[in-house]
Amino acid sequence: MVTDATGFLSYPPSNLIPMTVPATSTLPTLSPSRAADFKTCPLLYRFRTIDRLPERATPDQARGTLVHAVLEALFDAPAGERTPQRAAALVAPQWQRLLEQEPELAAIFDGSPLTPEEFQAGAAELLSGYFTVEDPNRLEPAERETYVEAEVDGRLVIRGIIDRLDVSPAGELRVVDYKTGGAPREAFEARAMFQLKFYALVLWRTRGVVPRVLRLMYLRDQEVCDFAPDAEDLTRFERTLLALWEAIELATQTRDFRAKPSRLCGWCAHQALCPAYGGTPPPFPVAAAELDELVVERD
């Protein structure tokens, strides 16, 4: 096993740092997923956030959800019992739980040669990669699948769900995000780190602590990508988010969400409605008088 050499090993639960949760706000909200949508393609943001077009989960997306569920459940077991065998044994019951919560996930097998057995075996293989890069018996995560949010400049609430938050005995934070896809090339690492900087900014604003480590854990390739932010990094990132939000507000007010073709278009569920592929977007769903209200809805 690759052991943790950064100091985030077992720690006393009394060292947890409380989060200051802001009061209910009427400010608009932005998640890292929707922010990334707009950066990738403004029209994709519109389809998902304003038009709210349905998207059927793909097998890869469902497998990622399953792996995250198993890793969260794995830490319910005491240290010493968090083994590859236990993780593998959790796959089937966690998949059943997800199907009960979201029956539509069963549709990933419709018209696909993939069988439920192959699907679960693929999840188990990804989980075996997890044990190659980390020994969960040497960790006691402070929080798992935890919701966080913070106000930014009195103009915007940023929010999201952190896969795992570790706290060292010295009170330092490490934000961990599990990835079931392949590790990006070096040129795309900054893009991959966008989500974790988002969470780091929330933690800094709510807990007054800049995380020591932001960790992307790529289970398929058994690779780890770490980034150590500082206050200057997060201040710049905050300005970037505010500029992005201004662009989203302008696009909403003008109803001008343009397609931005890229290699990612091959994974888009809405090509048939995209002008870049000869399609026509649906009519804008609200009247101009309702735009301000739309902007503050949950994204």
Image: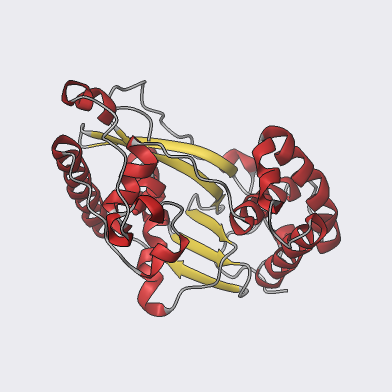
Q: Nearer the viewer, residue 119 or 202?
A: 119
Residue 80 visible in the displayed image: no
Residue at image coords 21%, 27%: 291
Residue at image coords 67%, 46%: 107
Q: Colour scheme in the image?
A: secondary structure
Q: Nearer the viewer, residue 209 or 123?
A: 123
Would you identify the image quadrant in which residue 64 lies?
Answer: bottom right
Residue 197 in picture, x, y percent from top left: 37, 55
Would you identify the image quadrant in which residue 202 lies?
Answer: top left
Q: Is 20 placed left or right of 246 in the picture?
A: right
Residue 268 in picture, x, y percent from top left: 43, 57
Residue at image coords 71%, 65%: 135
Would you identify the image quadrant in which residue 211 lies?
Answer: bottom left
Q: How many marks?
A: 0
Residue 44 visible in the displayed image: yes
Figure check: 12 above or below 133: above
Q: Is 117 placed left or right of 46 in the picture?
A: right
Considering the image in quadrants, where does the N terminus appear? bottom right
Taking the view exactly as shown, the residue that stands out farthest to the bottom is 186
Residue 297 in picture, x, y percent from top left: 33, 27
Figure check: 178 above or below 3: above
Considering the image in quadrants, where does the C terminus appear? top left
Residue 109 in picture, x, y percent from top left: 71, 53
Q: Nearer the viewer, residue 68 or 10?
A: 68
Q: Is 21 placed left or right of 230 in the picture?
A: right
